[in-house]
Image (tube, grey):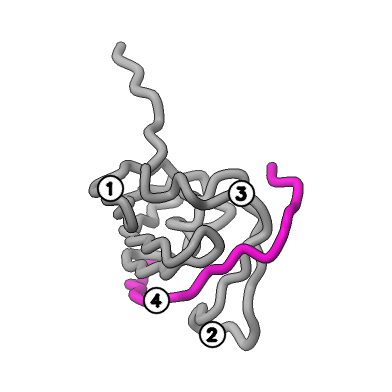
Amino acid sequence: MLLVAAVRPSALDKTSPGLWELSGLPNAGTAFRQCVADTAALARVEHRGNSCTQVVIKDNPSWTEIHYTCTNGGFGRSKLTVLTPRSMRIETQGISANYPFNYTIQARRIGDCTAH
């Protein structure tokens, strides 16, 4: 059996774990806050809380593209563009609860937290 270590996208090297605020989520009246131990988890915003595996498809100095598949059958592809070390644009699309999704949100780091 071949085991491959997870590769952290170099585009996210400037970002830090912590409390991130996500604005522009569909059907959300207010911004959503998420505590993350690894900013690559923000690629799975549509499937947050689900068990998913991810693969880095493209990695550039300022953006990365991640494909992920979840055990509940959902999947997606997200492009995370690092605007500053505390700000990202996330373009995401895929299938969630048997329905397609496609939207762009803004993410900004607003503080520290204890991520699990």
Q: In the displayed structure, would residue 83 be above or below residue 55?
A: below
In front of the other: 111 or 116: 111
- The quarter of the rendered structure image containing the N terminus is top left
Horizontal and vertical percent for residue 48?
55, 57
* Disc 4/disc 1 C-alpha distance (Å): 19 Å
Residue 54 as seen in the image, left or right of residue 37: left
Span shown in magenta = 98-116
* Disc 2/disc 3 C-alpha distance (Å): 26 Å
**Residue lying at 32% horizontally and 72% vertically, measured from the top left:** 100
Horizontal and vertical percent for residue 103?
38, 77
In front of the other: 98 or 115: 115
CA neighbours of label 2 inside 10 A, class few (<14), some (14 to 19), many (20+): few
Name the mark on residue 17.
3
Helix, strand or loop: magenta stretch? strand
Q: Single out the mark in the foreground, 4 or 3.
A: 3
Amino acid, disc 1:
Asp
Name the mark on residue 101.
none
Quarter location, residue 102: bottom left
Q: Which residue is mark 1?
A: 59
| Sequence-earlier tag: 4 or 3 | 3
Instruction: Evaluate if marks 3 and 1 touch, with contact meaning CB atoms under 8 Å apart.
Output: no
As helix, strand or loop, the secondary structure at mark 2 comes to loop
* Disc 3/disc 1 C-alpha distance (Å): 19 Å
Amino acid, disc 3:
Pro
| Sequence-earlier tag: 3 or 1 | 3
Residue 100 on the magenta span:
yes
**Residue lying at 66% horizontally and 67% vertically, measured from the top left:** 33
Quarter location, residue 101: bottom left
Instruction: Evaluate if marks 4 and 3 touch, with contact meaning CB atoms under 8 Å apart.
Output: no
Q: Which residue is mark 2?
A: 27
| Sequence-earlier tag: 4 or 1 | 1
* Disc 4/disc 3 C-alpha distance (Å): 21 Å
